[in-house]
């Protein structure tokens, strides 16, 4: 547990039992919130950590989700069961999947392939306990403090960032990419609904908020926020151009070749250990599939078959 700002504690949600991969955030208040419980396979650890931090079953008011990928939301069902007064807050597009996660889990497992057991599935959450968060939705923590959720699509259509005005903190989910094992940032653009232009617009919106702290789900606070956002934006721009070039030249395999040339993983993240982790999790490889799907749509003129 690490405090990243006054009243905001990072808890390692230990994807696959390994530190430094996925983070959740306990935001203190009369009505405390926990942002991104992590995968279902992390839920027992997260509940135990919150109990050890002094939260009894009635003490958690909100479970906030940056988006509905299983490494962020998969444990929400177990967390909701362990904290029966908590309300789950999620992007409007995510609500039905929290109530009936079967399709979300099946589609996610196709992407995760042999890594699916590391994530696990998801338990359904009663409809009465799920709230849809439109852009600008506010989560009241008591005593005037509140979290603001803003739509930051790009990584996914259902992606939101969580802002704490009291400390100038952005809990950014995957909007700025990821940095693993102390390496540099690199984009996370997996299937199925990556949008490069939307991702860059989301970064501009986060920059305009002038954050003091930006924390990536994978993993933890980035350095100087404005510099990190500029790096993330440049990386998305380079990646988008390379993916389009590749798609037009030769489909998915050419997308991979163009990305490896334009934004080589090792050079971007800076250390062999970090690059190994990107490959071990297959997040690096998943990017090619996400980008190929995006490029196919972006390269097809509207109205064309
Ligand atoms: Zn993620």
Image: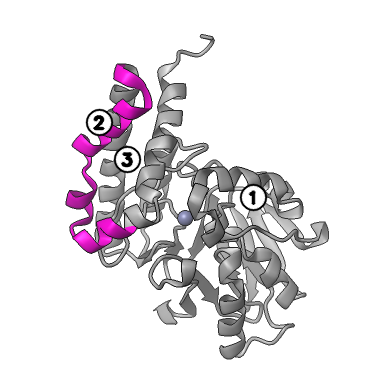
In the rendered image, which quarter contains the N terminus?
bottom left
Tell me if the residue at label 1 has its CB under 8 Å from ligand 1. no
Q: In which quarter of the image is residue 236?
A: top left
Give the distance between the C-alpha atoms of the residues marked 1 and 3, in whole angstroms. 27 Å
* Helix, strand or loop status at disc 3: helix
User: 272 and 293: which one is in front?
Assistant: 272
Give the distance between the C-alpha atoms of the residues marked 3 and 2, in whole angstroms. 14 Å
User: Is 223 left or right of 48, judged from the image as shown?
Assistant: left
Say which residue appears at 38% left-offset and 70% top-offset. Answer: 20
Q: Report if residue 190 lies within the magenta region.
A: no
User: 260 and 237: which one is in front?
Assistant: 260
Q: Where is residue 251 in the image (x, y as percent from the top left)?
A: 36, 22
Q: Mark 1 points at which residue?
A: 105
The numbered dot on residue 258 is 2
* Helix, strand or loop status at disc 1: helix
**Whether residue 32 is visible:** yes
**CA neighbours of label 2 inside 10 A, class few (<14), some (14 to 19), many (20+):** many
Tell which residue pokes out farthest to the front in this image.
Answer: 114
Range covered by the magenta-colored residues: 249-277
The numbered dot on residue 236 is 3
User: Is 231 left or right of 6, judged from the image as shown?
Assistant: left
């Amino acid at each position: 547990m690490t405090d990243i700002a006054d009243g905001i504690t990072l808890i390692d949600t230990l994807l696959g039992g390994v530190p430094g991969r996925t983070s959740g955030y306990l935001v203190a208040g009369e009505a405390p919130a926990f942002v991104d419980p992590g995968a279902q396979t992390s839920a027992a650890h997260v509940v135990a950590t919150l109990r050890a931090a002094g939260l009894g079953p009635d003490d958690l008011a909100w479970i906030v989700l940056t988006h509905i990928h299983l490494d962020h939301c998969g444990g929400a069902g177990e967390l909701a069961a362990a904290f029966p007064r908590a309300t789950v807050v999620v992007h409007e597009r995510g609500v039905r999947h929290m109530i009936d996660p079967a399709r979300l889990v099946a589609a996610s497992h196709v992407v995760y392939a042999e890594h699916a057991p590391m994530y696990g599935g998801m338990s359904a959450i009663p409809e009465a306990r799920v709230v849809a968060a439109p852009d600008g939705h506010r989560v009241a923590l008591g005593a005037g403090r509140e979290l603001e959720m803003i739509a930051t699509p790009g990584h996914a259509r259902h992606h939101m960032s969580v802002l704490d005005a009291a400390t100038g903190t952005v809990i950014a989910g995957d909007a700025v990419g990821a940095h693993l094992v102390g390496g540099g940032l690199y984009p996370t653009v997996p299937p199925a609904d990556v949008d490069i232009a939307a991702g860059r617009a989301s970064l501009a919106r986060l920059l305009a908020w002038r954050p003091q702290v930006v924390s990536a789900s994978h993993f933890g606070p980035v350095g100087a926020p404005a510099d990190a956002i500029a790096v993330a934006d440049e990386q998305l721009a380079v990646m988008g151009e390379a993916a389009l070039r590749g798609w037009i030249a030769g489909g998915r395999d050419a997308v991979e070749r163009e990305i490896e040339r334009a934004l080589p993983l090792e050079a971007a993240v800076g250390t062999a250990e970090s690059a190994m982790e990107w490959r071990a999790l297959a997040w690096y490889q998943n990017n090619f599939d996400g980008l190929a799907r995006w490029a196919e749509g972006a390269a097809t003129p509207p109205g064309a078959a």
